C-alpha cells in the first residue's frame, strides 16, 4: 500500500492488535457517536471529581466572604445596638458613685483616632462569644486587667483584627505619640502611645503585666494595652500597643470630647 | 452530579433555572447561618488574645 493508512484498509493486523483497535476506534465509523461502557464510566467519574473540586473551591470562597464580610455586618449591628443601650443607660442617669459600674453591658468606649474606626464598645472578657459581638474586651484571664480609674495598673484589651467587626484592623496605623481615649460615663481617660510590639508570640502573656516591662516601663503607672492578631487574616502572632495615661477630663453635660478627638 | 440534578428537576428550562436558584440560595443560607459559625472556631484564623496555651479565654 502506498497511500496513507485508512481505518478500514489497515494491513497485516494480528488478532491481538485487532481487538485493541476495535475498542479504540469503534466510534470512528459513520454511525452516531456511542461511547464504550468503560470510557463512559471513566468520563463520568472524572466529571464528578471535577464538579466536587469546583464545589470545594466555591465553598472556600464563600467562607472567605463569610469571615471577612458577613461577620462584620452582624458584629457591627450588634455592637451598635449594645453601644446605644449603654449610652441610653448613661443618659438616664442611673445609680452613680462606686459600684455603679455595669460590666455586663460594657464599661465604656475606646476611641483611637489613628485607627479611624469611630468608637469601640469595651466589655468584660476576651472569649470569642464576647469579641464576636464587634466589641473590645478587657482581659480577665490569664492576667486580670486593671480598670482605667484604678490608682495604677494596666488596662488590657483585645479585639478582632479581621471579621466580627475587625475593631483593631488598623492597629498598625497607630504610631508613638498618638492618642488613645477611653470614655466612661463620667470621665475621659486620655492616653498617649509610647511603645508598640509589632510581632510577638501568642503565648507572650508578659505583655499584659501590670508593669509591662517589654514596653520599657519599670515603675507602676496607669497603662493601657491593646492586643490583636498579626499579620492580617491570620493568627500566627500578636500585635501589641502600649499607651500611658496623660490626664483625665470630667465629662461635661454636652459630652464634649477631649481635644484629641476633635480633629 | 449537577447534570443529574438538572435532569431530575421538573418543568421546562425556566422553571428548572428558578428551582436551581432557590436551591443555591437555600444552601448559602444554611452555610452562613449554621455551618460556617460552627466551623469557624475550629479553624486557626481568628484568635486574637494572648494566653498561656491552656486557658480558654473566657
Image (spheres, coloured by chain):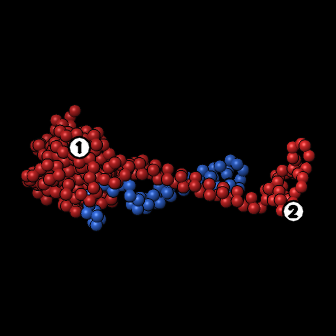
Chain colours: A red, B blue
Q: Callout 2: 10 Å neighbours few (<14), some, many (20+)?
A: few
* Chain for numbered disc 2: A
* Chain for numbered disc 1: A
- What number is the disc on residue A111? 1
Q: Which circle's residue, 1 or 2, is located before the other in the chain?
A: 2
Image height of A254 relative to A96, above or below: above
Label 1 secondary element: strand
Label 2 secondary element: helix
Contact? badges 1 and 2 (CB < 8 Å): no
A186 with respect to B16 (left or right): left
Marks 1 and 2: same chain? yes
Q: Residue at x 20, y 50 (%)?
A: A225
Q: Residue at x 22, y 32 (%)?
A: A263
Which of pointers 1 and 2 indicates the residue nearer the eye?
2
- What number is the disc on residue A151? none
**Label 2: which residue?**
A15
**Residue A42, quarter of picture:** bottom right
x and y, in percent, of residue A140 in the image: 22, 61
**Residue A48, quarter of picture:** bottom right
Q: Residue at x 47, y 53 (%)?
A: A63
Amino acid at each position: 500500500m502506498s497511500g496513507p493508512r485508512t481505518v478500514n484498509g489497515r494491513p497485516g493486523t494480528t488478532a491481538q492488535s485487532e481487538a485493541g483497535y476495535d475498542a479504540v476506534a469503534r466510534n470512528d465509523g459513520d454511525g452516531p457517536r456511542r461511547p464504550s461502557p468503560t470510557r463512559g464510566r471513566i468520563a463520568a467519574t472524572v466529571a464528578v471529581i471535577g464538579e466536587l473540586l469546583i464545589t470545594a473551591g466555591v465553598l472556600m470562597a464563600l467562607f472567605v466572604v463569610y469571615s471577612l464580610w458577613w461577620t462584620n455586618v452582624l458584629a457591627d449591628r450588634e455592637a451598635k445596638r449594645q453601644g446605644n443601650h449603654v449610652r441610653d443607660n448613661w443618659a438616664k442617669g442611673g445609680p452613680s458613685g462606686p459600684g455603679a459600674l455595669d460590666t455586663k453591658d460594657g464599661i465604656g468606649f475606646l476611641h483611637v483616632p489613628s485607627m479611624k474606626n469611630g468608637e469601640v464598645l469595651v466589655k468584660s472578657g476576651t472569649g470569642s462569644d464576647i469579641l464576636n459581638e464587634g466589641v473590645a474586651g478587657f482581659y480577665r484571664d490569664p492576667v486580670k486587667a486593671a480598670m482605667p480609674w484604678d490608682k495604677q495598673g494596666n488596662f488590657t484589651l483585645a479585639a478582632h483584627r479581621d471579621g466580627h467587626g475587625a475593631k483593631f484592623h488598623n492597629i498598625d496605623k497607630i504610631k508613638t505619640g498618638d492618642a488613645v481615649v477611653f470614655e466612661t460615663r463620667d470621665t475621659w481617660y486620655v492616653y498617649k502611645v509610647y511603645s508598640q510590639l509589632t510581632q510577638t508570640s501568642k503565648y507572650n502573656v508578659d505583655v499584659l503585666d501590670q508593669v509591662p516591662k517589654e514596653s520599657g516601663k519599670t515603675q507602676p503607672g496607669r497603662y493601657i494595652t491593646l492586643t490583636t492578631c498579626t499579620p492580617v487574616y491570620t493568627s500566627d502572632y500578636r500585635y501589641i500597643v502600649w499607651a500611658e495615661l496623660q490626664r483625665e477630663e470630667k465629662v461635661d453635660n454636652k459630652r464634649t470630647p477631649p481635644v484629641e478627638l476633635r480633629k | 452530579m449537577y447534570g443529574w440534578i438538572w435532569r431530575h428537576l421538573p418543568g421546562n428550562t425556566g422553571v428548572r433555572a428558578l428551582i436551581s436558584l432557590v436551591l443555591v440560595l437555600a444552601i448559602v443560607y444554611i452555610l452562613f447561618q449554621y455551618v460556617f459559625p460552627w466551623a469557624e472556631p475550629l479553624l486557626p484564623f481568628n484568635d486574637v488574645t494572648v494566653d498561656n496555651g491552656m486557658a480558654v479565654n473566657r
